[in-house]
Amino acid sequence: MEEKVDGRWDKAFETEKGHWQEAYDSDLYKKVVRRRFGFVIPAIVMFCLLFFILFTLQQFLRVLANTMVIGNMNVNFVYTMLLFPVLWLTGLIFLRYVRKNVYPLEEEIINKYGKKRGA
Amino acid sequence: MENLAIYIFLVLITVTLIITYVSARLMKTATDYYAAGRKIKGWQNGLAIAGEFMASAAFLGIAGIIAFSGIDGQIFSICWFASYLVVLLLVAEAIRNSGKFTFADVISYRLNSHVMRPIAAITTFVVCITYLIPQMVAAGALAKLLFGISTTWGIVIVGVLMVIYIAFGGMVAATWIQIVKAVLLLSGAYVLAIAVMAQFNFSINDFFGAVMNTKGLEHHLEPGGWLKNPWERYSLGFSLLFGTAALPHVLMRFYTVPSKNHAQSSALWTMTFMGMFHILTFIFGLGAAVLVGNSVIKSLDPGGNLAVPLLARIVGGGAGTFGGEFLMAFIITVAFITIIAAVSGLCIAASSAFSYDFWFNVVKKGQQSQKDQMNTARISALIIGSLAILFSLSVQRQNVAYLSGLAFAMAATAHLPTIIFSLYWKKLTTTGAVIGMLGGVLIGIVLVLTGPQFMGKKALFPLANPGIVSIPIGFLLTYFGSIFTKDSEAAHKYVELSVRSQSGLGAE
């Protein structure tokens, strides 16, 4: 590993800081990945779906999009305006979820498998 | 009016120069220069990133589209805002954990950095310059309309200020100027929105009623006024939603915060501030169409960029009144400062591509003193600034609005597959990434240049925003380039990058 075959040991990084393979194989790491993507993947799917519905509404379901729901506000406007709080709340919930359920595990990985600087 | 705008402009420029002076005095290391010493707080970074997306296109451009063509223009507002949820969910923490100053750090982590860094430097440079030129040309045009000076002088002033900010103040100045601007822009936007809604008793119902009762605006609340080609909406929408996660000048800002925790919270703060602003754009566009009138806006600027300033004058009390003239001058100046702040962010991304990715890591092989690193960065900012001024001057008489679309398409097509695969796909190889990145830039260029924005009605490719075609092609190129080649080192280092990006082990 010491020979720099093709410059992959980039000087920008100090790569020998942790027991990477051990960490990668640990249950702790698998748990981190499972918990994070257990949130991220459904959230991305929901995100794509919400926008697919919006664009389809605007493009192919104009009659519905132009139907007034609250006074002079039509479905298209209300839907677009609702996306702002819905997506923001998704972000907030994700952040809280990660801080509560993922960060503690990440800290454990760092403490357990990280080498001290210069060690 | 011109004089008042110039006075406000000079006051604000003085403030930005003071920021630059203080930043320059505080700067001691390369980390200070490229990443503001990693001392920016989450909400501050959020404001700065939001500032990048509340540029003149957002403030003046979207309002112009909505005023002329209706509610379709809102697609930029909602998609730019929403794109930060993608950044938060997929890249913010991973990028912060596994890099140092630029996104090239992340992609050259596993792959052969002698190959990846120069390529990333070239694509970053091309993307940033392509973004810079239309903004500087727009600034020149605005300067002519607003301050009564020539376009050439407008471009030179913006370019010189940009170089001063970046060469002396680095990322610290680029961040604080963006923050000051974002606060000014948000305050200006709220004053304006409240003043407009006051005319309609703060009732959206009355406001929309007035829109529908104005001749020529009967269908402005219905979608379809601007995006005519059915696939254009999907293509533009999805490229805006996913393209942001691939913009080098945005990703770079995630290195300015102290930790992954702050990186994630800054993405949420970005959503907060962008949401606060972009939820108002329909008020500006429709308000201008109702209160100013499209014929008046068109007679002064067929591009629609003056919709917001003219609206400010009307709701401030009308032409000739102090309130009207002051509000208009304020809005104009903020719009102009907005461009300067945005081009500065692009300038530091472009110059770091050269000075850090190429010069420091490839030519100097990571051996350069802190002082030399900063000097190279300053010189590259100067060179890039001069190039941007020269390019912008040479195309100032042409319509170069298509260049922003080109920059976005190139960034999304070339960078997104490599970033996502680098972080999440073990079989990515250096060859695959090279094919994907170079192919992505080429496809972006070909599809935009054969599309309607460049060729008009005779376009060979039907979409002005090719994202829906080009981004999947970028992914496919990278995929096939990788499965047919071998790169055992990249697979081996995948373990390390995964642990690092997912847990923060070893992160700076």
Image: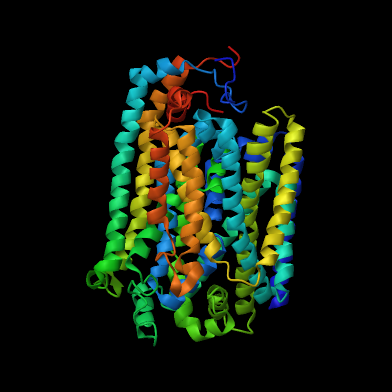
Question: Please, which colouring scheme is shown?
Answer: rainbow
Residue B7 can be seen in this image: no
Question: What residue lies at 60% left-to-right and 62% top-to-bottom?
Answer: B135
The N terminus of chain B, quarter of image: bottom right
Left or right of B85? Residue B30 is: right
Q: Residue furthest top?
A: A119
Where residue B353 appears, as percent x and y from the top left, is: 63, 42
Residue A93 placement: quadrant: top left
Q: Is residue B91 above or below residue B134?
A: above
B87 vs A15, nearest the viewer: A15
Residue B7 placement: quadrant: bottom right
B102 vs B92, nearest the viewer: B102
Where residue B58 appears, as percent x and y from the top left, is: 51, 63
Left or right of A66? Residue B201 is: right
Where residue B253 appears, as percent x and y from the top left, is: 56, 43
Q: Is residue B302 above or below residue B430?
A: below
Where residue B26 appears, as percent x and y from the top left, is: 73, 39
Question: What residue lies at 53% left-to-right and 85% top-to-bottom?
Answer: B296
Residue B463 can be seen in this image: yes
The C terminus of chain B, quarter of image: top right
Left or right of B377? Residue B442 is: left
B225 vs B392, nearest the viewer: B392
Q: Residue furthest front?
A: B484
- The mark tally for this picture is 0
Q: Residue furthest bottom?
A: B215
